[in-house]
Image (cartoon, helix red, strand yellow):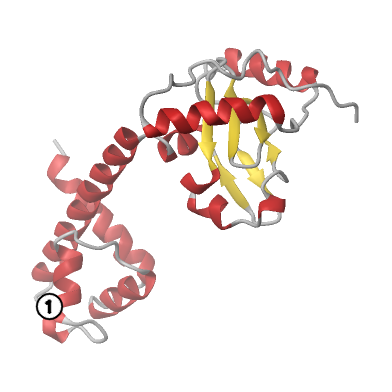
Amino acid sequence: MAEFPVRLDFIGKGVPQPGTRKQADAAAGATELQTAPIRRTPQSLIQDRITHASQVRGTNQLIATAAAFKHQLVVVSCSGETVIVPWKAVRALKAMPPEQRSCFEVDVHGSFLHWPDSDIHIDLDGLRMAIDPVRQAEAARQRQTHNESLGAAMRRLRERAGIRQHTIEGLSVRQIHRVEQGLVQPRLATYERLARAHGLTVNAYLNAVAEEAAAPSRG
C-alpha cells in the first residue's frame, strides 16, 4: 500500500505555550516532532476519515491520523486538534515495550487506536482525559457517584431481604460496609457471594440492583 506523509500542518494546533512544567513538556514535544521519524498514513485515508466524521458530526471525537515518537503519541482529530500524550500518561502504554508503541492501527473511521500485540484500544476522549486533570477529576466524581448509588441499592436489597451483613458467607462485615458505602468497586467474586446470599444468580442479582438503583428516579 502506498504511503504518504502525515499532514504536519495539522500537528501543532492547540499546543500550549511554554510556561508551566506541562507546557514545557509540550514545547519539548514540539521540538521532537521536527526531528523524529513520522508514522506515515495514506492521505486519501485521512481525508476519508475527515469526510465520514463531518457526515456523522463527530469531527471532535474521531481521529484523522496519529504519529508515534520516542516520548509521546501525537494524535490529530478530524477537526484539526492536536493532542500530544506522553507515553507515561497512559498506564497501559507506559508499560508497553517501547518498540511496540508505534505498532498501532487507526480504526477505519477513526473511532480508536488499536495496539494488536497488546490488544489495547484507546479513543480520543480517553487520550484527552489522560492529559487533562479537569477531565480526570470529573470522571472520578462520576465513578464515586455511581459507586454510592450502586452501594445504596445493594444495601436496600439486603435489608429488604432480611439479610444481616455478618451472615453473608465469604465476605467480612467491613467488606460489605465498604461496598454499600460506595467506597470500593465490587469485584465479580463479591457479586457472586452477594447473589448467593440472596438466593439469586449473578445476572438476576445485578438486574435487581440496577432496578433498585433506578427506582428513586422513577416518576
Q: Nearer the viewer, residue 78 or 159?
A: 78
- One can see residue 202 in this view: yes
Q: Looking at the picture, how far across and down is residue 45, in whole percent?
A: 76, 22
Q: Report the side of 136 relative to 82 (left or right).
A: left
Q: Looking at the picture, how far across and down is residue 121, in whole percent?
A: 58, 46
Q: Is residue 98 above or below residue 51?
A: below
- One can see residue 212 in this view: no
Residue wearing tag 1 = 163
Q: Nearer the viewer, residue 13 or 66?
A: 13
Residue drawn where x is 71% and y is 17% of the image: 7
> Which residue reaches farthest right?
1
Q: Looking at the picture, how far across and down is residue 188, in whole percent?
A: 38, 70
Q: Report the side of 83 relative to 206 (left or right).
A: right
Q: Looking at the picture, how far across and down is residue 82, in whole percent?
A: 54, 22
Q: Amino acid at mark 1?
A: Ile
Quadrant placement of the C terminus:
top left
Q: Is residue 2 above or below residue 133?
A: above
Residue drawn where x is 60% and y is 26% of the image: 31
Residue drawn where x is 56% and y is 50% of the image: 93
Q: Quadrant of residue 41?
A: top right
Q: Is residue 26 above or below residue 114?
A: above
